[in-house]
Image: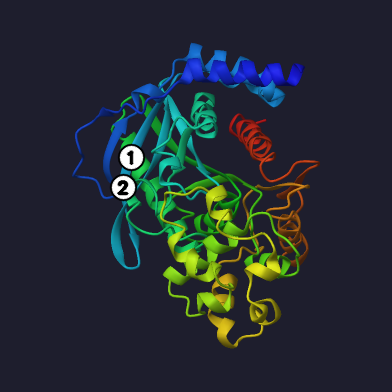
């Protein structure tokens, strides 16, 4: 009963303090920037320091970890929606996301948060900045970061195209271009400057995206961004091992994850036929399920959690043996995250009771870093969250990451 009352108090306080009606304070379009196309302050999402401190006090009832960093919230926050130019399939595309700026004058690092799997256009960060998770991330700018939350292609300003789910090339490119656009935005805000430091954080799909982004920043943009730390939570890093896990199960509670992946790869040029992977009626349904109007639960309801009914017998037996499945297998390999000789302090975080994205995917990546590639365990750390499933680990993973980032930023 006490835990229920705490949740109830937290919920109503959240609604009262941060109720958002998505009102935008328009700023004239900017035409002289290479990346930034337009920006708007979201007036209803901007908060004073008093509001933020009140929120943190109440949120600490639900998440006691916040109490340890309560004194780090020292500024109000202004939240902006930006649209920017990126590229996809050799063509220019508009993309979008949220940028959260401290209102206190100063020079700040960027913290980019890559969110988890989403299928709803209405749930993209820039479309739904009042979402509970996004609001918690937005207030983290008060601790001394410019917080960046990309929408991803397929959402926000790019919702006229499919979402290239778990595609490294387009995911990384769209986020890097957003970071460039953020620099152009900050140049227009007189009170805020950037110090070139960058922190990366994400969960689930976002944990996978963060690891892919980390490697690209290190190998291609080291002179542009000073990557200070990266925290990857609950990521499906090895897509080959993940598929091997799926076909070995009797049931899988989130069949839409696999359907989303295969539909994405089909749109990206995969030649493996859909009906050689999924059985009917599911193979015929899948191309129409990811139009941005259905959430994961609604899509799951059009599929089945029984693997032998969902997947074609030939796929279960031969998915990794070439032939008709070669195209899919190659794309899974190309989009797998593996260990390398990183120089970035890295956290791999995973709930140990995760049945959606099994914890062995982070454990194996940790071994690949520290054993196969000889990276020091002082540089790459595996944090196991006992008893937490995929959903339950979202906020603890984020708070673990942000607390760590604050310590690094403050020199602790």
Residue lying at the far bottom of the rendered structure: 323
**Residue 100 appears in the figure:** yes
Residue 82: assigned label:
1
Image quarter of residue 361: bottom right
Asked whether the beta carbons under mark 1 and mark 2 sit within 8 Å of each other, the answer is: yes
Q: Nearer the viewer, residue 62 or 287?
A: 287
Q: Is residue 1 left or right of residue 178?
A: right
Q: Quadrant of the C terminus?
A: top right
Where residue 291 appears, x then y in whole percent?
A: 41, 55
Residue lying at the far front of the rendered structure: 281
Where residue 174 appears, x then y in whole percent?
A: 40, 54
- Say few, some or many: other residues with alpha carbon within 10 Å of mark 2 (under 14 / 14 to 19 / 20 or more): many
**Distance of mark 1 from mark 2, alpha carbons?**
6 Å
Q: Nearer the viewer, residue 137 or 248?
A: 248
**Residue 71 appears in the figure:** no
Q: Secondary structure at mark 1?
A: strand
Where residue 132 appears, x then y in whole percent?
A: 53, 30
């Amino acid at each position: 009963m006490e835990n229920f009352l705490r949740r109830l108090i937290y919920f109503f306080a959240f609604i009262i303090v941060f109720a958002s009606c998505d009102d935008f304070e328009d700023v004239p379009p900017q035409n002289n920037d290479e990346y930034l196309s337009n920006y708007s302050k979201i007036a209803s999402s901007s908060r004073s320091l008093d509001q933020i401190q009140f929120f943190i006090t109440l949120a600490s009832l639900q998440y006691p970890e916040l109490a340890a960093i309560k004194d780090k919230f020292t500024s109000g926050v202004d939240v902006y929606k930006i649209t920017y130019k990126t590229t996809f399939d050799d063509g220019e595309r508009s993309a979008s996301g949220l940028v959260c700026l401290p209102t206190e004058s100063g020079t700040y690092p960027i913290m980019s948060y890559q969110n988890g799997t989403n299928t709803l256009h209405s749930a993209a960060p820039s479309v739904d900045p009042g979402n509970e998770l996004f609001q918690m991330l937005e207030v983290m700018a008060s601790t001394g970061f410019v917080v960046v939350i990309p929408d991803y292609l397929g959402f926000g300003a790019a919702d006229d195209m499919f979402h290239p789910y778990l595609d490294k090339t387009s995911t990384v490119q769209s986020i890097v271009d957003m970071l460039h656009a953020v620099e152009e935005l900050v140049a227009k805000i007189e009170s805020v400057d950037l110090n070139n430091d960058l922190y990366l954080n994400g969960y689930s799909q976002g944990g996978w995206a963060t690891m892919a982004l980390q490697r690209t920043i290190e190998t291609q943009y080291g002179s542009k961004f000073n990557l200070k730390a990266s925290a990857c939570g609950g990521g499906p890093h090895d897509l080959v091992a993940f598929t091997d896990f799926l076909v070995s199960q009797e049931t899988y509670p989130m069949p839409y994850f696999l359907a989303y992946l295969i539909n994405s790869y089909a749109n990206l040029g995969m030649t493996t036929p859909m009906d050689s992977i999924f059985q009917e009626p599911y193979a015929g349904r899948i191309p129409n399920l990811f139009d941005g109007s259905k959430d994961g639960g609604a899509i799951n309801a059009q599929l089945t959690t029984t693997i032998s009914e969902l997947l074609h017998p030939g796929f279960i037996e031969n998915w990794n043996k070439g032939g008709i499945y070669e195209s899919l297998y190659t794309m899974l390999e190309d989009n797998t995250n593996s260990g390398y000789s990183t120089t970035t302090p890295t956290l791999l975080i995973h709930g140990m009771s995760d049945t959606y994205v099994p914890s062995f995917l982070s454990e194996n990546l940790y071994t690949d870093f520290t054993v196969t590639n000889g990276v020091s365990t002082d540089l790459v750390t595996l944090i196991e969250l006992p008893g937490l499933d995929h959903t339950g680990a979202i906020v603890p993973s984020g708070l673990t990451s942000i607390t760590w980032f604050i310590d690094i930023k403050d020199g602790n």
